[in-house]
Image (cartoon, helix red, strand yellow):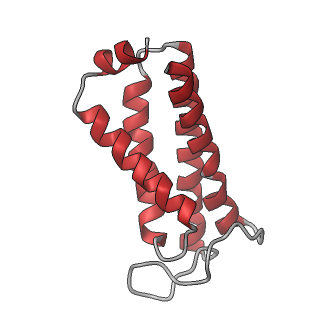
Amino acid sequence: MRWLVGIFFIMHGLGHTMGFLASWTGVDVGFSDDPWIFPGDIHIRSPIGKAYGMLWLVALFGWTVTGLGVLDGAEWWPALAKGSAVVSLTAIVPWWRTVPMGAWLGALADVVVFVGLLTMSGAEAVDRLA
C-alpha cells in the first residue's frame, strides 16, 4: 500500500507541471483561454497567471517530496501532504474555468487527502502505510 500511495503522490506532483507550463510557456497542455474565476480579464499567461504558475511549481515539489517521504517511511510526510494539498488547491481554484479535467480530478485528490489526513494523526497515517 505504501508503494501505491507514494507513487500516486509523486505522479500527482508531476501533474502540476501542466499549470507551470501553461502559465510560463506557449506549450499547449489543455488549458483554455478563458479568464480566471475572479473579476477582471486575467489569463493564465498574464503576470498574475505566472505568479500562480509558481504555486503550481511549489505544489509539484511538495507532492513529489511527499511521495518520496511515503516511500521512505518518513514520519513527516502527512504534514507535507496537507501543506501540498493547500498549495495545490490555491493554485488551481482561481483557474477552475481554464484547467483540463485532469486538474479537476487532482483537486478532488487534494481534498480527499487533506480531509483524510485531518481525521487522523500523523503517526496513525504513517502506521497505516507501514
Please say if 41 is above or below 87.
below
Please say if 15 is above or below 82.
below
Residue at 42%, 34% (x, y): give it: 81
Residue at 57%, 80% (x, y): give it: 43
Quadrant for the C terminus in the image: top left
Give residue 31's position: percent from left, percent from top: 62, 72
Q: Residue furthest bottom?
A: 41
Q: Residue furthest left?
A: 119
Rendering quarter of residue 45? bottom right
Give residue 106's position: percent from left, percent from top: 49, 52
Residue at 24%, 26% (x, y): give it: 120
Give residue 128's position: percent from left, percent from top: 36, 17
**Number of marks:** 0
Whether residue 104 sits left or right of residue 60 in the image: it is left
Residue at 55%, 69% (x, y): give it: 99
Question: Considering depth in this image, is 4 or 103 the residue closer to the camera?
Answer: 4
Rendering quarter of residue 29? bottom right
Question: Considering depth in this image, is 120 or 22 the residue closer to the camera?
Answer: 120
Please say if 113 is above or below 67.
below
Give residue 108's position: percent from left, percent from top: 41, 53
Whether residue 117 sits left or right of residue 47 in the image: it is left
Whether residue 117 sits left or right of residue 11 in the image: it is left
Please say if 17 is above or below 61.
below
